[in-house]
Amino acid sequence: MTTETFAVPEVIAREYRAGETTLKSTQPLAPFAPSMAHLLRMHAAERPDRMIATEDLGGDDRQRLTWGEARRRADAIAAFLLANGAGPRRPLLVLSGNSLDHLLVMLGAFTAAVPVVPVTPAYSLLSKDFARLQGIVSVSRPGVVFAAGEIEFGPALDAIAGFVPVRLLSGASTPSATGLDDLPHRPADPTVERAFSELTPNTVAKIMFTSGSTGAPKGVITTHRMLCSNQQGFVQVWPFLATEPPVLVDWLPWSHVFGGNHVLGMALAGGGTIHIDGGRPGGPVFQKTIDALSGVAPTMHFNVPLGWAALEADREFAEHFFSRLRLMFNAGASMPEPLWRRLKALAADVADHPVPLISGFGSTETAPTVTIAHEPSPPYGGIGTPMPGVTVKLVPAGEKLEARVKGPNVFPGYYEDEVATTAAFDDEGFFKTGDALSLVDPGNPSAGMRFGGRLGENFKLTSGSWPRSTPWPTP
């Protein structure tokens, strides 16, 4: 490990109006890719035979997808979407958990400049009336729906049949839907190449619906600028990413911003590999996570406190897990301090190199990362400093300081909701997060910040869930 893990955090703090402070990294944001589709094509050209992702098929079998094959199949999916009425105002609705097929349709939509609407599977598989799903469909008006299976998602597909005219499925075609396996590939399809050539950083990549903890879900417009600028910021604060393509084993849902933008985005932007983990923290299904991690030693790992706690038990497993790990990243909820101390001690005991335990802060509206820790030994509860190019404004709100954010990672607004969009920004164009932050050391802003909770006093479970809902977590 010759490349330094972290850049030195340096922050400029300025007193600003009555009681307000702005914080910004001294490191300017470097140029970034125009879109995630451009990154796909770049890495596919440079490393076509490298694995972009794998998925468990049961037993010891894993399905594998290379960067070159991902590019070829994404082009075929892009052609299908464009031929069937999908476009900037007719997005692709995705009803699926994390899978290779989910990844492929996402990449195909990116290539075709078609926004992706990833919906948590709970709205399709656990709902009885499908009201949340129908609400999302009525707002986003998708042109095509992708479902991971016609039987599993059949009731949900029937509930929206009158809204979405075209169905795309995993596997082979059926009488009512086209299968991914049957899509023809035409190299350099002119329709696809025309759509790709028109991609810009302002093109909408996703519409990510919040969970609706305070009402109906709102669609967060997520542009390629937001995704790509956030990933460029990571390369600048974690320099090893510039030369070491990340290897990730991950379960975090792609329908939520942390798994779908932060983690998956890091693998895609860095030309790395994501091994899709079919497990979840807690319960018997977590054994799938242990099995996945036993087969692959990750270079970084992202998890929620409940997941981290389950990884402590076995020393032989820990030696393998930490063998090439650059960092541990906690999100979803604040980690209990005893667990934080145990994990740091375990890493120091079994690894032959430092493995810092860090965190950050963000939201669905910021793609997601606003602040990130990039120091070898951040304090307990520390969430780091602003990402390059991001300005954080701390505004008095009662006894707390609300974090407001401006930068290329901030969303342009809520989809088809001008009232909510206007309310989300202050008079200077800063996004009002509704979260409280504080400086670790008021005399040294480069020491970073701590999360002070929601201004509304909600709280998170150690699984990363809110008691009443599951929006993207702020650690």
Image: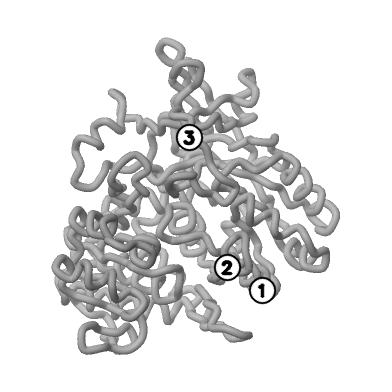
Q: Secondary structure at mark 3?
A: loop
Q: Which residue is mark 3?
A: 458
Q: Earlier in the sequence, mark 2 or mark 1?
A: 2
Residue under the point 54% across and 68% down: 274
Residue under the point 45% across and 27% down: 455
* Res 387 seen here: no
* Res 235 seen here: yes
Tell me, what colour scheme is on the image? one colour
Which class describes the residues within 10 Å of circle 1: few (<14), some (14-19), or many (20+)?
some
Q: CA distance from mark 2 to mark 1?
A: 9 Å
Q: CA distance from mark 1 to mark 3?
A: 35 Å
Residue under the point 81% across and 58% down: 351
Which class describes the residues within 10 Å of circle 3: few (<14), some (14-19), or many (20+)?
few
Which class describes the residues within 10 Å of circle 2: few (<14), some (14-19), or many (20+)?
some
* Mark drawn on residue 279: 2
Q: Indicate the position of residue 36 as horizontal and vertical percent values.
A: 38, 61
Q: Secondary structure at mark 2?
A: loop
The answer to whether the residue labelled 2 contacts the one labelled 1, judged by CB atoms less than 8 Å apart, is yes
Quarter placement of the N terminus: bottom right
Q: CA distance from mark 3 to mark 2?
A: 27 Å
Q: Which residue is mark 1?
A: 291
In this rendering, would 424 be left or right of 55?
Answer: left
